[in-house]
Image (spheres, rainbow, N blue to C red):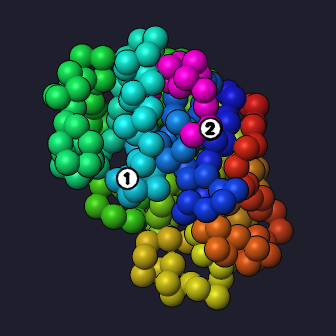
Amino acid sequence: MKIEILGCSGAAAKGFNTTSILINGEVLVDAGSAASVLGNKRLSGIRHILLTHSHIDHIKELPFILDAVCFGKGKGIDIWGSGVTLSAIKKHLFNGILWPKLKQLELDGSICRIHTLPADTFKLNGLCAKGVKAEHISGARSFVISEGDKHVIFSGDTAYTPRLFNLAASLSTRLKMFFVEASFPDKMHEVARLTGHLTPAVIGRELYRLKKSRVIAYHIKPRYFKEVTRDIPEGMEYIRGGEVFNL
């Protein structure tokens, strides 16, 4: 499994791209920056987009990705999200005001296929994926991606929930990487809690259960990047964007 961090920041700023993580060149987790980072040829190779939720930093380049994939030399694309997330992007993004409606673009159900996430694991071009309820806005999801016995978790935006960390711990040695959001520094723990986010200290309390996996902080707000990274506890890593991992 090849994981390319095209962007992983909790806001847009110079030198920081919002969240888009490309797996095996074909599966994209969130659509925050892929069109700004990849050329048209690589964009056209994307076959699936998994949306964690509908906040703008996770969907803002979705229209431009669809331009490249559906009007270029791509073979069409499948977009996956919770029913709440898909309803939000149709109503508030592809609404004929901010961007043409999908039907106006002749994308609805043909070369752009929209899927509500199933309850169980589903297959994506040699990978398996499962959406897990996150504690953020309505419809938010974390994703577990697997290839054979190698599993990776992307938390998406979430407040603390035992469900996520219990899942990570249950995978034991099969969990190779756990990308978990750490939007704010420890001193802003109350802001993080109220806005549905995590801090390094909250994650740190769970590290004793995750010693067999790489735990990697992402979705750090650029404004607080130095503070958050100073708060990262021993046994945890962080990313800024541009990293590539091969499992």
Q: Quadrant of residue 149?
A: top right
What segment carries the magenta color? 36-48
Residue 37 badge: 2
Mark closer to the chain start, 2 or 1: 2
Task: Report the residue at 42% width, 35% height from top.
Answer: 64
In the rendered image, which quarter contains the C terminus?
A: top right
- Amino acid residing under circle 2: Val
Does dot 2 land on a helix, a strand or a loop? helix
How far apart, in angstroms, are the residues tagged by discs 2 and 1? Answer: 21 Å
Instruction: Give me the residue at 17% from left, 29% from top.
Output: 104
Query: Would you say 117 lies left or right of 143 here?
Result: left
Q: Which residue is mark 1?
A: 53
Left or right of residue 169, residue 144 in this image: left
Q: Is residue 229 above or below residue 134?
A: below
**Percent x, y for residue 4?**
67, 36
Query: Looking at the picture, how far across and down is residue 183, in whole percent?
Result: 58, 69
